[in-house]
């Protein structure tokens, strides 16, 4: 069906649950403690994610999506305006005396 006005979509909270394994965490803690007691170096370096870049990338993506939605609404609005002006002009040209009487001129 043709829709004249578009309904806004609701924002959804997208939470991806992470699995937490307490046994694995305890095992890793024991391994770390044992390596520290034996004086072994821990070769594994913690990975620190580039959160700032991820936020910036997501912001730019959402900004582009917002601007395309806004431009579509603007085009729709001007199309409706043009159609209304054409209809008003057509009515005025077809029956100018009736319109003049309607406005009391």
Image: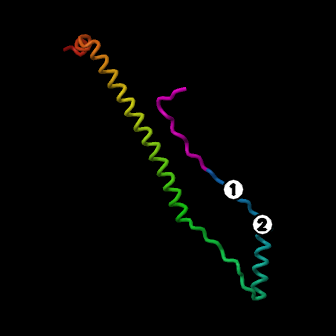
Q: Which residue is mark 2?
A: 22
Q: Secondary structure at mark 1?
A: loop
Residue 3 in the magenta stretch? The answer is: yes
Residue 61 vs residue 21: left or right?
A: left
Q: Quadrant of residue 83?
A: top left
Q: Nearer the viewer, residue 96 or 52?
A: 96
Magenta region, residue range: 1-13
Q: In the image, residue 3 lies at what x, y percent?
A: 50, 29
* Precedes in sequence: disc 2 or disc 1: 1
The residue lying furthest to the left in this view is 105
Q: How is the image coloured?
A: rainbow
Q: Quadrant of residue 77?
A: top left
- Residue drawn where x is 44% and y is 39% of the image: 72
Q: Which residue is mark 1?
A: 17
Q: In the image, residue 86 lies at what x, y percent?
A: 33, 23
Residue 89 in the magenta stretch? The answer is: no
- Above or below for 10 versus 20: above
Magenta part, dominant SS: loop
Q: Secondary structure at mark 2?
A: helix
Neighbourhood count class around disc 1 (C-alpha, 10 Å): few under 14, some 14–19, many 20 upward: few
Q: Quadrant of the N terminus?
A: top right
Residue 97 vs residue 61: left or right?
A: left
- Above or below for 14 versus 40: above
Q: In the image, residue 50 lies at what x, y percent?
A: 57, 67
- Residue drawn where x is 31% and y is 21% of the image: 88
The residue lying furthest to the bottom in this view is 39
Q: Quadrant of residue 30?
A: bottom right
- Residue drawn where x is 56% and y is 45% of the image: 11
Neighbourhood count class around disc 2 (C-alpha, 10 Å): few under 14, some 14–19, many 20 upward: few
Residue 6 vs residue 12: left or right?
A: left
Q: In the image, residue 79 lies at what x, y percent?
A: 39, 31
């Amino acid at each position: 069906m043709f829709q004249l006005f578009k309904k806004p979509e609701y924002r959804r909270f997208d939470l991806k649950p992470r699995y937490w394994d307490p046994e694995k965490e305890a095992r890793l803690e024991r391994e770390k403690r044992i390596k520290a007691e034996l004086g072994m170096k821990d070769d594994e370096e913690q990975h620190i994610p580039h959160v700032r870049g991820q936020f910036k990338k997501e912001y730019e993506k959402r900004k582009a999506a917002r601007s395309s939605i806004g431009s579509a609404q603007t085009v729709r609005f001007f199309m409706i305006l043009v159609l209304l002006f054409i209809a008003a002009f057509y009515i005025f040209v077809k029956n100018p005396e009736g319109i003049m009487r309607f406005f009391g001129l």
